[in-house]
Image: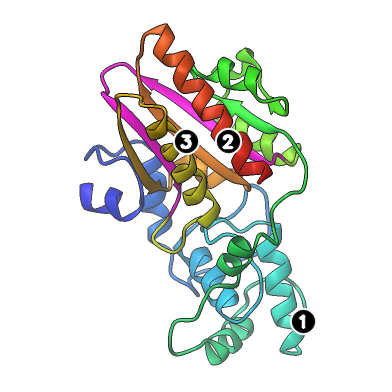
């Protein structure tokens, strides 16, 4: 179980929690096992992730490779069908799968979504920075960021609610914070799965880590790519922060370093 969690970018607990169980079910789907199409709730699975990879290798943009069949994948699949002279239904039929396998490259190619991410083509030009999470730093960071979208009443929101809100308002980014009383450091997580990762997310994590290090905060800093739900469900650059409980003065100092780094990153 720990090996599976590690391979999927989950917290390594050895326990089958709800997130792990959901990904175990998704791992059972292979491309061609079922029809794939846009429906709500969105279809999820390894077959969807493989479809995203194959289309992206061919130059069609299905969005981030996250195993979720959303609107971008629907558009990319329809464009592929149109280019092949097939019915543009946006549904992965057996005929479409045959053509997809026929055109798929033998060797690995750069994924178009990762190239677009690196070039900045898909970054929103405006929108708030959503700050969320049960942390003593959340309100301080929000106060220091003029474009912050924050409300203490959202602490009780689920990940799905926060992600839906961020996606709906076209957020520039999302900063999710969680205070862990028994931890002795700061963990910065960006989106990464066994199929792809967010270059922008990794860059944001590195920017924040460097700012903290320059601020002489005596805490161990770790950067890790993960596929936690908040990172998977949000469509924009998202950073999930887990940190130790700190004295008020140290928390304030750290929050200022965070806010400055976040502001500089999104407006550089």
Element under disc 1 = loop
Q: Nearer the viewer, mark 2 or mark 3?
A: 2
Question: Tag 2: Cα neighbours inside 10 Å, few (<14), some, or many (≥20)?
Answer: many
Residue 240: assigned label? 3
Dot 2 and dot 1 residues touching (CB under 8 Å):
no
Q: Look at the image and give the residue range highlighted in magenta.
A: 171-192
Residue 143 vertical placement versus 187 (above, below): above
**Residue 260, position as x, y percentages in the image:** 57, 30
Does residue 219 appear left or right of residue 84 in this picture? Answer: left
Dot placed on the residue nearer the N-terminal end, 2 or 3: 3
Residue 87: assigned label? 1
Question: Tag 3: Cα neighbours inside 10 Å, few (<14), some, or many (≥20)?
Answer: many
Residue 100 vertical placement versus 113 (above, below): below
Dot placed on the residue nearer the N-terminal end, 2 or 1: 1
Dot placed on the residue nearer the N-terminal end, 3 or 1: 1
| Residue placed under numbered mark 2 in the picture | 262
Q: Residue at x 51, y 55 (%)?
A: 198
**Residue 83, position as x, y percentages in the image:** 74, 86
Question: Would you identify the image quadrant in which residue 161 lies?
Answer: top right
C-alpha distance separating marks 2 and 1: 45 Å
C-alpha distance separating marks 3 and 1: 41 Å
């Amino acid at each position: 179980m720990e090996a599976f969690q590690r391979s999927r970018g989950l917290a390594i607990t050895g326990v089958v929690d709800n997130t792990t169980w959901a990904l175990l079910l998704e791992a059972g789907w292979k491309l061609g096992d079922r029809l794939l199409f846009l429906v709500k709730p969105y279809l999820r699975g390894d077959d969807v992730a493989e479809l995203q990879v194959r289309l992206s290798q061919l130059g069609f943009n299905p969005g981030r490779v996250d195993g979720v069949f959303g609107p971008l994948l629907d558009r990319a699949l329809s464009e592929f069908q149109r280019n092949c002279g097939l019915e543009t239904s946006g549904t992965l039929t057996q005929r479409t799968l045959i053509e997809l396998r026929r055109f798929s490259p033998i060797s690995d190619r750069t994924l178009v979504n990762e190239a677009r991410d690196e070039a900045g083509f898909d970054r929103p030009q405006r929108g708030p920075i959503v700050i969320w999470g049960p942390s003593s730093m959340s309100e301080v960071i929000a106060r220091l960021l003029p474009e912050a979208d924050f409300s203490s009443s959202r602490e009780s929101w689920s990940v799905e609610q926060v992600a839906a809100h961020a996606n709906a308002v076209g957020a520039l980014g999302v900063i999710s914070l969680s205070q862990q009383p028994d931890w002795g450091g700061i963990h910065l997580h960006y989106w990464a799965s066994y199929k792809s990762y967010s270059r922008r997310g990794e860059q944001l994590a590195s920017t924040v880590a460097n700012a903290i290090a320059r601020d002489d905060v005596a805490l161990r800093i770790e950067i890790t790519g993960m596929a936690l739900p908040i990172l998977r469900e949000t469509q924009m650059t998202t950073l999930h922060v887990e940190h130790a409980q700190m004295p008020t003065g140290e928390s304030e100092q750290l929050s200022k370093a965070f806010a400055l780094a976040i502001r500089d990153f999104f407006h550089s």
